[in-house]
Image (spheres, rainbow, N blue to C red):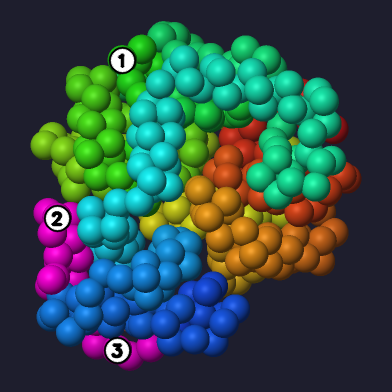
């Protein structure tokens, strides 16, 4: 039967794999299971089998693809530069097209329409805040237990949508800030830090009112029409700015791949940067100050979509050092924490195991302050570390140090 959609895995992507196996030790699901079918090479082989007509998009195919975290740890080590994340998005698009069940339709509604709707985010924010106040996470329900990883959120959520702040230093350019679907409502302090730091570094910063969710979660789940629609809205909303900056690593990685999702996406992708890159550059240029050392440690957690998808590792550390702290490594390989968007709900056992392992890595370095540049990772860390740990975005750590608020 083969493929049915324009986003399907491409033959050149599949042919690029020379089956060397170098990616296997990097893959979290292979490391957990030891199974070839749970490895990048095995998943590419399964895609190739469908492409050649030897296999179909059936239960087994869906199972093999569904266990993938889409962490892209397999990409940096691949000598053939197989674009695994792109191929996996294509495989998910095929599963959604060929096996449209009611569960998938509900997910598409939530990830595509729900995250793209400010009214829906406000409603969810209210109930999430209420759940926190009522301490519902104490109930023996796995789904509800996930709210333990959230910061304490206000009932109305935060919002910087529509704001425009002028440069507070000699002007070097314009920035459009992606507010993010839940980033602004639930992690508003991160966007506030971005606005403060970017204006202090000489940027006119706008949070365009016409923007929407970046569409990463929809794309990862195969909800192609929604991913395309959201990308198209954002390409229009972010036109005309020198740079488009996102404060969540998952969002900046997805914006950088917009060429796949909409016309004009390639042009916009060329202007996209993660906030850690822009702030670190401003520190290096002397547009933002480096503070004196305070001899306190920060455990560095690399979100997969920063480290593996965008190859950004130095910048968060440079920011933490500029804040006066000593960055401490927790994991040389950058193994996924298991959050992975909706993966923590779809594959809770694997997600929990990876979350426990990541927490153990943090505990081993004895640092109570943890830097993470992605909200999903932050939630996973907080849920697994428990009390006694403070988990912040690197730019928050730096902004708080500049304000003199650090403890
Ligand atoms: S994206 Fe991550 S989980 Fe999926 S195959 Fe690659 S390394 Fe393994
Ligand atoms: S490292 Fe690249 S070429 Fe080698 S098996 Fe993995 S995906 Fe294939």
- The answer to whether the beta carbon of the residue marked 3 is less than 8 Å from any atom of ligand 2 is yes
- The residue drawn where x is 36% and y is 29% is 113
The reply to whether discs 3 and 2 touch (Cβ–Cβ < 8 Å) is no
Q: Secondary structure at mark 3?
A: loop
The mark found on residue 19 in the picture is 3
> Which residue is at the far front?
102
Report the label total.
Answer: 3
**3D distance between C-alphas at marks 1 and 2:** 29 Å
Which quadrant would the N terminus be assigned to in this image? bottom left
Residue 290 location (% of width, % of height):
63, 36
Q: Is residue 150 left or right of residue 343?
A: right
Q: Which residue is label 1 attached to?
A: 210
Nearer to us in this view, 288 or 272: 272
**Quarter of the figure with residue 272:** top left
In terms of sequence position, does the residue under pointer 3 or pointer 2 come before the other?
Answer: 2
- The answer to whether the beta carbon of the residue marked 2 is less than 8 Å from any atom of ligand 1 is no
Q: Is residue 176 left or right of residue 399?
A: left
Q: Which residue is label 2 attached to?
A: 5
Range shown magenta: 1-22
**Quarter of the figure with residue 68:** bottom left
Residue 344 location (% of width, % of height):
58, 53
1 or 2: mark nearer the eye = 2
Q: Is residue 156 above or below residue 301?
A: above
- The residue drawn where x is 13% and y is 80% is 52
Which quadrant would the C terminus be assigned to in this image? top right
Q: Is residue 92 above or below residue 383?
A: below
């Amino acid at each position: 039967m083969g493929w049915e959609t324009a986003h399907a895995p491409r033959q050149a992507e599949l042919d690029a794999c020379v089956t060397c196996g170098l990616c296997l030790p990097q893959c979290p699901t292979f490391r957990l299971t030891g199974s070839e079918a749970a490895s990048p090479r095995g998943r590419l082989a399964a895609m190739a089998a469908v492409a050649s007509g030897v296999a179909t998009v059936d239960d087994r195919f869906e199972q093999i693809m569904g266990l993938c975290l889409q962490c892209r740890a397999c990409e940096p080590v691949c000598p053939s530069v197989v674009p695994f994340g792109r191929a996996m998005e294509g495989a998910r698009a095929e599963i959604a097209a060929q096996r449209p069940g009611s569960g998938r339709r509900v997910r598409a509604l939530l990830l595509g329409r729900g995250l793209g709707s400010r009214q829906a985010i406000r409603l969810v924010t209210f109930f999430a805040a209420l759940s926190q106040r009522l301490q519902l996470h104490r109930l023996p329900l796995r789904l509800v237990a996930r709210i333990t990883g959230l910061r304490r959120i206000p009932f109305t959520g935060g919002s910087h949508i529509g704001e425009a702040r002028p440069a507070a230093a000699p002007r070097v350019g314009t920035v459009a800030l992606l507010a993010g679907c839940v980033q602004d409502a639930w992690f508003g302090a991160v966007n506030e830090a971005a606005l403060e730091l970017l204006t202090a570094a000489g940027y006119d910063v706008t949070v365009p009112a016409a923007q929407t969710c970046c569409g990463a979660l929809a794309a990862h789940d195969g909800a192609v029409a929604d991913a395309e629609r959201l990308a198209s809205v954002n390409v229009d909303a972010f036109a005309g700015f020198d740079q488009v900056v996102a404060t969540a690593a998952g969002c900046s990685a997805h914006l950088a791949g917009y060429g796949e999702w909409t016309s004009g996406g390639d042009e916009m992708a060329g202007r996209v940067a993660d906030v850690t890159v822009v702030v670190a550059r401003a520190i290096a240029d002397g547009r933002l100050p480096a503070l004196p050392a305070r001899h306190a440690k920060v455990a560095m957690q690399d979100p997969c979509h920063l480290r593996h998808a965008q190859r950004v590792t130095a910048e968060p550390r440079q920011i933490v050092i500029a804040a006066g702290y000593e960055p401490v490594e927790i994991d040389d390989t950058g193994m996924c924490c298991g959050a992975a968007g909706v993966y923590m709900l779809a594959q809770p056992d694997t997600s929990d195991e990876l979350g426990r392992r990541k927490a153990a890595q943090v505990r081993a370095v004895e640092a109570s302050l943890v830097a993470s540049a992605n909200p999903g990772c932050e939630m996973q860390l907080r849920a697994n570390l428990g009390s006694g740990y403070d988990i912040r975005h690197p730019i928050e750590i730096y902004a708080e140090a500049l304000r003199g608020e650090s403890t």
